[in-house]
């Protein structure tokens, strides 16, 4: 699902490996081949070099994990094979290697509720706690202009002091 959401957010796929409609749901054959050694059990502690991802890629992966991480394997399968999904559109029982196109994924996922971002969740929690959100002015280059030494302009720091 990271490929789909990245595609919707940024208009380009997160990766270029083919996704196919198999009996149990969408499969990236290259990934299936690499992880086949683990069987059908859950995957634990697989090392990942996060430095290989751009900030946009990493944030999308984190958002997908946060949203879909609560689902079991069977729950994720049900989501990905539901009626009208890109998998459903190309799946033929008993066959493999039927490609789910990037265009089909983009068309389907752009009509889904937007995936909540980490920033959205953070702001929700801040608003729910009653804390004030301070928005700094933005420079011509698009970066926030932060106060140099006068942190008093930023209001009450409450429990954040070094006391």
Image (cartoon, helix red, strand yellow):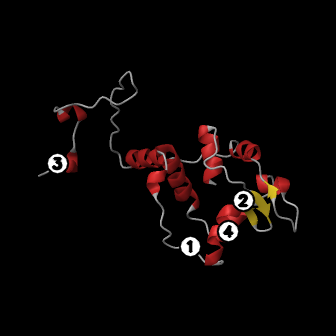
* Left or right for 139, reference 82: left
Of 82 and 95, which appears nearest the observer? 95
Q: Which residue is drawn at 68% across and 53% down?
A: 17
Callout 1: helix, strand or loop?
A: loop
Q: Where is residue 116 in the image (x, y as percent from the top left)?
A: 54, 47
Q: Name the residue under label 4.
A: 33
Q: Mark 2 points at which residue?
A: 80
Neighbours of disc 3 within 10 Å: few (<14), some (14-19), many (20+): few
Alpha carbon distance from label 4 to label 2: 20 Å
Q: Mark 1 points at which residue?
A: 43
Q: Which of marks 2 and 1 is in front?
A: 1
Of pointers 1 and 3, the one earlier in the residue sequence: 1
Q: Where is residue 31 in the image (x, y as percent from the top left)?
A: 65, 64
Q: Position of residue 137 (x, y in %)?
A: 34, 26
Q: Which residue is drawn at 72% across and 64% down?
A: 78
Of pointers 4 and 3, the one earlier in the residue sequence: 4
Q: Residue 113, can we see it?
A: yes
Work out whether 13 lies above or below 40: above
Callout 3: helix, strand or loop?
A: loop
Work out whether 87 lies above or below 134: below
Q: Nearer the viewer, mark 4 or mark 3?
A: 4
Callout 2: helix, strand or loop?
A: helix
Alpha carbon distance from label 2 to label 3: 48 Å
Alpha carbon distance from label 4 to label 3: 52 Å
Of pointers 2 and 1, the one earlier in the residue sequence: 1
Q: Nearer the viewer, mark 1 or mark 4?
A: 4
Callout 4: helix, strand or loop?
A: helix
Q: Nearer the viewer, mark 2 or mark 3?
A: 2
Q: Where is residue 96 in the image (x, y as percent from the top left)?
A: 82, 64
Alpha carbon distance from label 2 to label 1: 19 Å
């Amino acid at each position: 699902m990271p490929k789909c959401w990245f595609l919707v957010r940024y208009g380009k796929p997160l990766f270029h490996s083919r996704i196919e409609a198999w009996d149990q749901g969408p499969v990236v054959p290259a990934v299936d081949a690499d992880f086949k050694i683990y069987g059908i059990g859950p995957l634990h502690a697989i090392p990942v070099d996060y430095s290989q991802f751009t900030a946009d890629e990493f944030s999308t992966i984190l958002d997908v994990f946060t949203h879909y991480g609560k689902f079991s394997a069977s729950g994720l399968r049900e989501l990905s094979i539901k009626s009208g999904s890109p998998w459903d559109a190309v799946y033929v029982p008993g066959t493999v290697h039927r490609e789910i196109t990037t265009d089909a994924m983009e068309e389907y996922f752009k009509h889904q509720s937007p995936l909540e971002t980490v920033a959205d969740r953070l702001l929700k929690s801040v608003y729910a706690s009653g804390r004030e959100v301070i928005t700094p002015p933005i420079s011509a280059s698009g970066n926030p202009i932060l106060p140099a030494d006068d942190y008093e302009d930023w209001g009450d720091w409450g429990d954040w002091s070094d006391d």
